């Protein structure tokens, strides 16, 4: 099948999922066309079946806001016609489902019918999409999609509560390529980060408010009061500066390493003992799954879809949002001795295998086939 994928190309879960899905589809013989404003960070183009089409938004002095949706829908029309695309898969409803719908309608004028799959990722619903300024357009474009999927059961329920959805929402969980982690040799250069006997605690995110970065620092502060430890903070975002200041105020700046955005997440997770994810809201928690496949247990909040990934008392522990005492207590119960930590590590990787890419990508293929077979139904 020839599939056009629209996603955000930057660091962030939805872009990562879309990119990994596209690569996997290409490896399974599909022709995949990414349409977005920059080459997705995890996309390597050295594959016969992968194409990247960059969306340019020409600047004009009259525009206070550049009309990205307009440029995206035009680019989709051109790409779909030129490459005879069978199906459009948009990741993150805003504004991709809206632009995708416009492209569909323009193409229909020319007698070309392309089904659109919309995958909801989280903040497009829980944070941004429900804002009254966006809600009517988001509701419309979800309802106009031929198939809607969500990355967790929790996000599906949230979407049904917030929006007036007329059709089905199918849950297809996020996934991980477990084979990549079991076959790629990674030399865990632990000594670069911590001394012998120190535990390494890690957090990876885009440092937005929803990630509750101060909770990460405060939980770590409590951990390091009980045992020798280092905290590695990976990512960039608006909360980073305040986090650095908080470390200074708590007197732990020498124990916290801020690494910025990284393409070497696996190497960092390789030497990590524990992953912290205390988010306010999290539709799935791909970062937790990435930690787990790298044998890192997770201390998290019980927000949104995290309980569908992190198993209480098995792969880690979950606490109420903001309960840093409970998170620190749970973290210490895992880190206290090597035997307990080893048991949680084994559990983490075992549970991560349930989300293996080979189990999940065929679910998307099934949906594509179904949408393609019934493509004239909704015209
Ligand atoms: O978590 C973020 O801030 C990034 C965001 C995104 O769209 O890139 O992540 C969302 O989608 C991921 C992939 O499906 C999920 O794993 C994250 O849980 C979700 N984030 C939130 O719901 C806050």
Image (tube, rainbow, N blue to C red):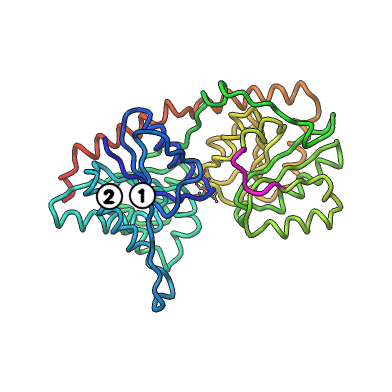
Task: Please say if 221 is above or below 267.
Answer: below
Quarter of the image for residue 69 reads bottom left
Percent of width and height locating residue 204: 64, 44
Quarter of the image for residue 359 reads top left
Percent of width and height locating residue 13: 51, 45
Task: Please say if 365 is above or below 161.
Answer: above
Q: Secondary structure at mark 1?
A: strand
Name the residue at the left extreme: 111
Looking at the image, residue 284 sits to the left or right of residue 97; the answer is: right
Foreground: 329 or 1?
1
Q: Residue at x 77, y 38 (%)?
A: 329
Looking at the image, residue 34 sits to the left or right of residue 192; the answer is: left
| Mark 2 and mark 1 residues within 8 Å of each other at the beta carbon | yes
Q: Which residues are magenta?
A: 259-264
Q: Which residue is mark 1?
A: 53
Whether disc 2's CB lies below 8 Å from ligand 1 is answered: no
Q: Residue 275: within the magenta?
A: no
Foreground: 232 or 2?
2
Mark 2, residues whose alpha carbon is within 10 Å: few (<14), some, or many (≥20)? some
Q: Which residue is mark 2?
A: 79
Mark 1, residues whose alpha carbon is within 10 Å: few (<14), some, or many (≥20)? some
Placement of the N terminus among the 4 image quadrants: top left
Task: Please say if 94 is above or below 25.
Answer: below
Does the magenta stretch mainly form a helix, a strand or a loop? loop
Q: Secondary structure at mark 2?
A: helix
Percent of width and height locating residue 296: 66, 31
Q: Residue 262: within the magenta?
A: yes
Q: Residue at x 42, y 55 (%)?
A: 37
């Amino acid at each position: 099948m020839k599939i056009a994928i629209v996603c955000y190309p930057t660091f962030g879960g939805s872009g990562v999922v879309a990119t990994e899905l596209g690569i996997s589809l290409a490896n399974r013989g599909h022709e995949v066309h990414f349409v977005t404003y920059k080459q997705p960070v995890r996309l390597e183009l050295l594959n016969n079946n992968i194409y990247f089409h960059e969306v340019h938004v020409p600047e004009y002095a009259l525009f206070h806001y550049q009309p990205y949706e307009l440029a995206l829908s035009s680019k989709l029309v051109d790409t779909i016609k030129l490459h005879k695309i069978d199906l459009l898969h948009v990741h993150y409803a805003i504004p991709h489902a809206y632009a995708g719908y416009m492209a569909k309608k323009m193409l229909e004028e020319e007698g070309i019918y392309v089904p659109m799959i919309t995958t909801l990722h989280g903040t497009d619903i829980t944070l941004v999409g429900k804002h009254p300024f966006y809600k009517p357009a988001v509701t419309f474009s979800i309802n106009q999609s031929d198939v809607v999927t969500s990355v967790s059961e929790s996000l599906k329920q949230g979407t049904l509560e917030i929006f007036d959805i007329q059709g089905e929402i199918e849950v297809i969980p996020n996934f991980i390529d477990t084979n990549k982690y079991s076959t790629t040799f990674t030399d865990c250069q632990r000594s670069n980060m911590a001394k012998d006997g120190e535990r390494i605690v890690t957090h990876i995110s885009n440092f937005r408010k929803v990630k509750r970065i101060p909770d990460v620092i405060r939980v770590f502060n409590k951990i390091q009061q009980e045992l020798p430890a280092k905290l590695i903070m990976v990512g960039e975002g608006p909360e980073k500066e305040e986090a650095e200041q908080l470390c200074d105020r708590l007197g732990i700046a020498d124990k916290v390493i801020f690494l910025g955005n990284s393409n070497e997440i696996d190497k960092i997770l390789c030497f990590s003992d524990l992953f912290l994810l205390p988010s306010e809201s999290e539709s799935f928690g791909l970062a937790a799954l990435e930690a787990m496949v790298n044998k890192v247990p997770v201390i998290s909040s019980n927000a949104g879809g995290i309980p569908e990934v992190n198993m209480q008392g098995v792969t880690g522990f979950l606490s109420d949002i903001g309960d840093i005492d409970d998170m620190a207590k749970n973290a210490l119960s895992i880190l206290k001795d090597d035997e307990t930590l080893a048991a949680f590590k084994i559990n983490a990787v075992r549970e991560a295998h349930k989300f293996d890419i080979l189990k999940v990508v065929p679910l998307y293929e099934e949906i594509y086939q179904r949408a393609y077979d019934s493509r004239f139904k909704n015209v």
